[in-house]
Amino acid sequence: MLRQIVKDYQLIDPVDSKLLPGGESAAPKELIFHIMQDNAANVEVLDIGFGKGGLGELIKSHPAIKHWSVDGVDGFEGAFNNPSLFERKIYRNAWHGLAQGIPSDRFAKYNIICLLDVIEHLTAETAKWLLRTLLTSMGNDSFLFISTPLWFYPQDSQQGGDLEEHLIGVPATSMMALVPMMYAVNPPLIGGFVLSKRSLDFIEFFQPTTDKSFSYHRGTMLASAINFQNVPGKLFKLS
């Protein structure tokens, strides 16, 4: 179930919580500028796991895309204890709840669905289910922008119920097997990928690992073996 906190830029159900927004993201968020052929179009964005709102802030602060509409979902109650984010009307609508609780028919209305630094917090089976559901349910001309560490990045909870613990690692082989349209990488080997509907044809090759010994070194070696271009700040277009 999703609880709507913000509706049409208005805070309708304030969260009474002492928990604070968390989750610093190292995702290459700048990929968002390169996804659409026409940034002047009216674009609908769904930001799943928006955390402190960094992606929404980036969109709304950029002259070329500040007219885009951004909705957000987050499973951590503390993400909504962020008055400034909502007072500045960064997110049009925002819901408290898990990605797994989003009705699948809702995905079709968005041009870009963002899943930044989320799947590594899920179990392997849930991550595979969610990725398949998003690719299946999104529109034929929509895009999935996903980022994740390409290794088992050890991280535990920082405050109660914050969902910050990492449960899986995602090898570069898994993400590249989905035939992304473009990708970029930030230290420490955090990959960002833009997937289209065609990635659904390759979903069986998405195989995260629960092996905590899948270290940064091993992740880098595997990325190098498939010629994954680990060049921070550079955009690589594959189609």
Image: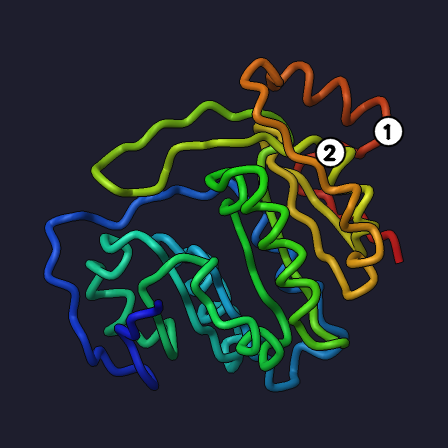
Q: Name the residue under label 2.
A: 172
Q: Which of the image's four quarters has the N terminus?
A: bottom left
Mark count? 2
| Marks 2,1: beta carbons within 8 A | yes
Percent position (x, y) of residue 191?
65, 40
Specify the quadrant that holds the C terminus.
bottom right
Instruction: Tell me the kind of residue under disc 2.
Output: Ala
Q: What residue type is labelled 1?
A: Ile
Using the rendered view, name the quadrant where residue 39 is placed.
Answer: bottom right
> At numbered mark 2, what does the secondary structure look like: helix, strand or loop?
helix
Query: Measured along the vertical axis of the image, is residue 105 above or below residue 49?
Result: below
Residue at image location 35% in from the left, 42% down from the top: 163
Q: Which mark is residue 226?
A: 1
Mark 2 neighbour class, 10 Å CA radius: few under 14, some 14 to 19, many 20 or more:
many
Q: 185 and 15: which one is in front?
A: 15
Closest to the observer, 180 or 126: 126
Q: Is mark 1 on a helix, strand or loop?
A: loop
